[in-house]
Image (cartoon, grey):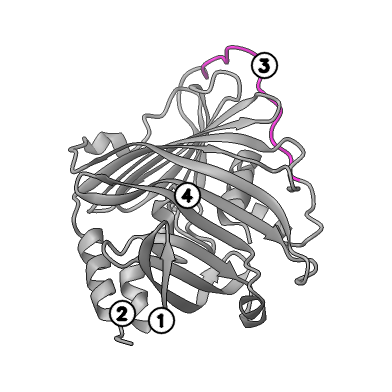
């Protein structure tokens, strides 16, 4: 069997270097029918994401909770430093707090990069697949969505709770991931019980690129490895995607409103901008509150960002994006 690692890595690298920017909007329907760790879980998630080849990034996120509350956070990066902006829970446009830090979003923690599905699955941890596939183990071929795929195993991937084993199936023609599984260890891999499985359900050509426009992400509780329990099965859709669009640099840093508290973790100071804070349209919504997870897959340490007072919404998104 010919080793396809060099060819697939070259295709992945060409894909990663084929754009000067991209802008994508995605929608997710979250289903925690099988369990979950939140008293008021996210039911839908809408994301607007922009990234440029020179490191400018914006992630604007709206989470709709089970009780209908909508929470809004946004992350900005000007290529050197980042800002996390939390908004009033009622108005969703009135800024409440801003954290300035080095890492974008939660990328100072283990797990995938702070990018929306499906783009975060073009990485093993935070390492681009084209860089790590040459060091992976080739497992052979399989069919997925009636497409021939090459399957690779990647050991010691940095994840939320230490090192994990990742198995990724890449479309043989376009080298895009079609299935991505995270295993806690070799035993779980041999038993075929991942803690997380993402798989594309529809692929379309967008601007001459193969894009996983619809996909499903599943997470499992592995309290008993012989009886894995599905705790989430969420559906994702790429609604709009554009490549090589020009953006003003000002789009990648927040315009701070009056009366907003700013925590600058780089300069190690905090201050409030001049002026009276904007008034919300109604009383601020109750923050999201996390409860302990019996499976132990969501440690309390994930809620400690080292940024005192960070909204629990950010902790919720941290759990959601980087679980298992």
Which of the two labelled residues, at mark 3 and mark 1, occupies the earlier sequence position? 1
Q: Which mark is residue 5?
A: 2
| Whether residue 323 can be seen here | yes
According to the image, label 1 marks what residue?
Answer: 136
Residue 225 x, y percent position in the rendering = 75, 71
User: Does residue 315 appear in this view?
Assistant: no
Residue 106 spot, x, y in % from top left: 51, 53
* Depth check, front residue: 35 or 19: 35
Image x and y of residue 76, in percent:
39, 42
Marking on residue 283 = 3
Helix, strand or loop at mark 3: loop
- Secondary structure of residue under mark 2: helix
**Dot 3, crowdedness within 10 Å: few (<14), some or many (≥20)?**
few
Residue 140 screen position, x and y as percent: 41, 80
Name the mark nearer the viewer: 3 or 1.
1
What is the C-alpha distance between the residues marked 3 and 2?
Answer: 56 Å
- On the rendered structure, is 196 left or right of 250? right
Name the residue beneath numbered marker 4: 105
Q: Separation of disc 3 and disc 4 at Cα?
A: 27 Å
The span shown in magenta is 277-290
Q: Quadrant of the N terminus?
A: bottom left
Q: Is label 3 in contact with label 2 (beta carbons under 8 Å)?
A: no
Q: Residue at point 24% right, 51% down? A: 209
């Amino acid at each position: 069997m010919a080793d396809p690692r060099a060819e697939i890595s070259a295709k992945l690298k060409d894909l990663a270097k084929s754009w000067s920017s991209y802008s994508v909007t995605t929608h997710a329907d979250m289903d925690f029918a099988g369990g979950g760790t939140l008293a008021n879980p996210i039911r839908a998630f809408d994301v607007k994401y922009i990234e440029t080849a020179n490191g400018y990034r914006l992630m604007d996120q709206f989470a709709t909770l089970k009780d209908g509350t909508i929470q809004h956070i946004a992350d900005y990066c000007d290529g050197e430093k980042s800002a996390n902006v939390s908004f009033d829970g009622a108005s969703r446009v009135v800024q409440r707090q801003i954290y300035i830090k080095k890492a974008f979003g939660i990328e100072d923690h283990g797990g995938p990069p702070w990018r929306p599905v499906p783009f975060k699955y073009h990485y093993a941890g935070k390492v681009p697949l084209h860089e790590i596939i040459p060091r992976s183990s080739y497992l052979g071929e399989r069919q997925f969505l009636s497409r021939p795929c090459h399957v690779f195993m990647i050991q010691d991937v940095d994840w939320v709770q230490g090192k994990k084993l990742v198995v990724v199936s890449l479309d043989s023609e376009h080298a895009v991931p079609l299935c991505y599984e995270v295993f806690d260890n070799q035993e779980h891999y041999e038993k075929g019980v991942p803690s997380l499985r993402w798989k594309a359900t529809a692929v379309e050509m967008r601007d001459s690129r193969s894009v996983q426009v619809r996909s499903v992400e599943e997470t499992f509780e592995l309290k008993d490895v012989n009886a894995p329990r599905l705790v989430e099965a969420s559906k994702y859709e790429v609604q709009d995607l554009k490549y090589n669009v020009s953006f003003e640099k000002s789009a990648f840093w927040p315009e701070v409103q009056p009366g907003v508290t700013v925590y600058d973790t780089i300069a190690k100071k905090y201050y409030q901008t001049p002026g009276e804070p904007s008034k919300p349209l109604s009383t601020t919504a109750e923050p999201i509150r996390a409860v302990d997870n019996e499976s132990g897959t969501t440690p309390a340490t994930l809620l400690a960002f080292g940024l005192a007072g960070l909204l629990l919404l950010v902790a919720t998104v941290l759990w959601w994006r980087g679980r298992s």
